[in-house]
Amino acid sequence: MNKFKASGVGEAINRIDGRLKVTGMAKYASEFPVENKLYAQGINSTIAKGEIISVDTAEAEKLDGVLAVITYKNAEKLNTFDEEMPQLSTTTIAPVLQSPKVNYYGEFVGVVVAETFEQAQYAARLVKFEYKQDSNPAIDFDESRSKAYKPNENSDYFRGDMAAGMAEADETLDAIYNTPIEHHHPMELHAIIASWENGKVTAYASQQMVEHSTIAISDTFQIPKKDVRVIAAYVGGGFGSKLNTERHAIMAVMASKMLGRPVQFTVTRHQMFTNTGMRQFNEQRMQIGAKSDGTLTAMSHETLSHTSTYQEYQEPCGMMTKMLYDVPNSEIKYRLIPMNFQTPFAMRAPGEATGSFALESAMDEMAWKLKMDPVEFRIKNDTQIDLSENKPFSSRLLKECLRIGADKFGWENRNMKPRTKQEGNWLIGYGVSAASRRAPYRETSSKVILELDGNKVYATIQMDATDIGTGSYTIIAQTAAEYLGIPVEQVTVELGDSLFPLTPGSGGSWGAASYCNGARAACLNAISKLKQNRNIGKDEDIAVAELLKTNNLDKFEAEGTATPSEEFKKHSVFSFGANFSEVWVDKDTGMYRIKRMVNVGSAGKIVNPKTAYGQIIGGLTMGAGMVLAEQTKVEPNFGNFITRSLADYHVPVNLDMANIDVVFLPEEDKIANAMGIKGIGELGITSVAASIANAIFNATGKRMRDLPITPEKLIKAPLEAGLVS
Ligand code: MOS
């Protein structure tokens, strides 16, 4: 029997659901064959702020197949916010169509339900709204600055004395970094098929956390949570946009309740810009003080961003800044401006992806001021204690990530002085950045069903976890195979049903650690119960098939729950990484190429290097996207977004990401959890943008603090003081 050999790396097997996916057999939310279903199409507002003064549905209602046009006039009265600016979370209610008030351009103001998708889509265009427009919507960030306030959820953080730290510094830096509005854009559109039957809801929905979705729906409609079932067997990406339950889902449930038939609501790609979350614009001011020997004395990180006018979300951009380096004096501040856009929400490493661009660009700027190697500067200020929580890290291999990455990348070939490496018309630069991402681990339950067939045991694992494209199915199967001592081919994994045992769902990089430990707990419970029944010693080495036979059972079920330990709570548990980039910039046109990247990650046990590698290259691609192209632009007169498809919201393609090396440092962090797994999902995007921007500085001598870095911005940017072209 398998002896659970300690190892920081599992097997790089193919995805167990790979075949289902490439053959189109994996069912996504809108593909479930629900009989008798209707189709809903949302209608969006065409003003940024104001009120609906009349609705004319006559023409739409006359059309064949149209069953209902629902607006605030005839919508069911739902549970609405009872406080000013409530915080958006993954369980928040989502009232919709409750008032004539319009809060932003593109807000859902109505829904048409028809027999076919085409009828619904056509009819939606025939519904006429008249508005009384507010002449002064908050759609310009600069003009709205005076409305900035301290968020209700206070995340400001102070340690030591920032002013004193700056005063004792030999070099100081004070710089502002901007990141634009971005959108998540998973390939699978947000979708739901909702059925209301006798006060109970069944919903096939593209959601990252099915349990939280049941809470959002039950709280919005004021029905018991147990009467809501959410199924998300496969999810085609989420990146944070499917963490919470959006208003299309609520409208589908409402329409089904009204019409007595199942209703499918698929959000269009166009609507994914206004109705399924976004990342807001962030203006981040970094101040750093350091001694001439490179010792940090002070660091502050102030983030100014925006939320909607009706709900609050603050991206925690200072998260990494408060824990990454050994700096005694630190200040983290957040301010928010209410604006007439939808409420932003968690997107692709919320806090780290954007915060690390500011932090790790600023660290590079400071290294250049000190004429220190940026790898050595980071290593000099390394710490094994999380100063923001006064806790030791469970494990922290940041120095090792930096050293091994530098070696693999050939960092010794870098010239410290910018604009000194050239090939023909290309200016060549190397950049580095450090990364860290909290590795949470949450209580997770699962059920294992064992079935004996001859001498073989087949196992089924059930949990309400989701696989959002990350490989959850596969690593859960690998875990069950390991702890049951059976081949992975004999394991079936069933996920994404709120009737299954509870897990935290997919988000925040806690999936792998939580799901695997949850599956392990059920398997170990099953074995221990089978042994107890027959008075077999718990250390006795006996195959699970034999155990079932001695128990005279051909089927056996057990549940198990994994819970974070006291040791976990006493430590700060993070994954760490380092990014290295080589960029070639055309010195006349400002066009540039990311020639190669090296990423080194330390994230505890890597259960499956193949799926983990997929996570990291996905993250690197998103990080490169932040620099190369991703941005959502606001039309300045009406407040609409003018980038409304993937043809104008650009993401990197394979050619942009030609040459990537990913290295995992094998470790088992047994303080983190029993299996030693830490999260990896969001580590991959963290600080990638800074490593590329730092490489651009090394190539050109131009410090680019405003993402994305377009050739136009690069050509126009001034050279750093003291450098000549
Ligand atoms: Mo993530 S942004 O927690 O899906």
Image (spheres, rainbow, N blue to C red):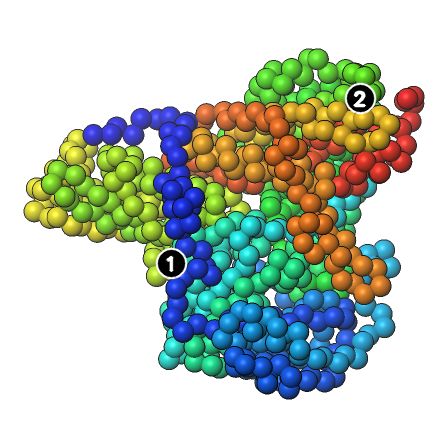
Give the left or right position of residue 43, taking residue 723 as reference.
left
Q: Residue at x 33, y 47 (%)?
A: 493
Residue 520, which numbered label? Answer: none
Q: Earlier in the sequence, mark 2 or mark 1?
A: 2
In front of the other: 390 or 449: 449
Q: Residue at x 52, y 29 (%)?
A: 602
Give the left or right position of residue 299, taking residue 311 as reference.
right
Residue 497, which numbered label? Answer: 1
Above or below: residue 540 compared with residue 253: above
Q: Residue at x 78, y 47 (%)?
A: 283
In front of the other: 117 or 80: 117
Give the residue type that dot 2 points to: Leu
Eye-nearest disc, 2 or 1: 2
Residue 404 figure quarter: top right
In the rendered image, the quadrant that contains the C terminus is top right
In front of the other: 558 or 465: 465
Q: Residue 193: where, in percent of width, then height?
A: 46, 67
Q: Secondary structure at mark 1?
A: loop
Give the left or right position of residue 693, taking residue 197 as reference.
right
Residue 147 figure quarter: bottom right
Residue beneath label 2, please? 427
Q: Secondary structure at mark 2?
A: strand
Mark 1 surroundings within 10 Å by alpha-carbon count, few (fewer than 14), some (14 through 19), many (20 or more): many
Q: Residue 309: where, in percent of width, then height?
A: 72, 67
Residue situated furthest top in the rendering: 412
Observer able to see residue 669: no
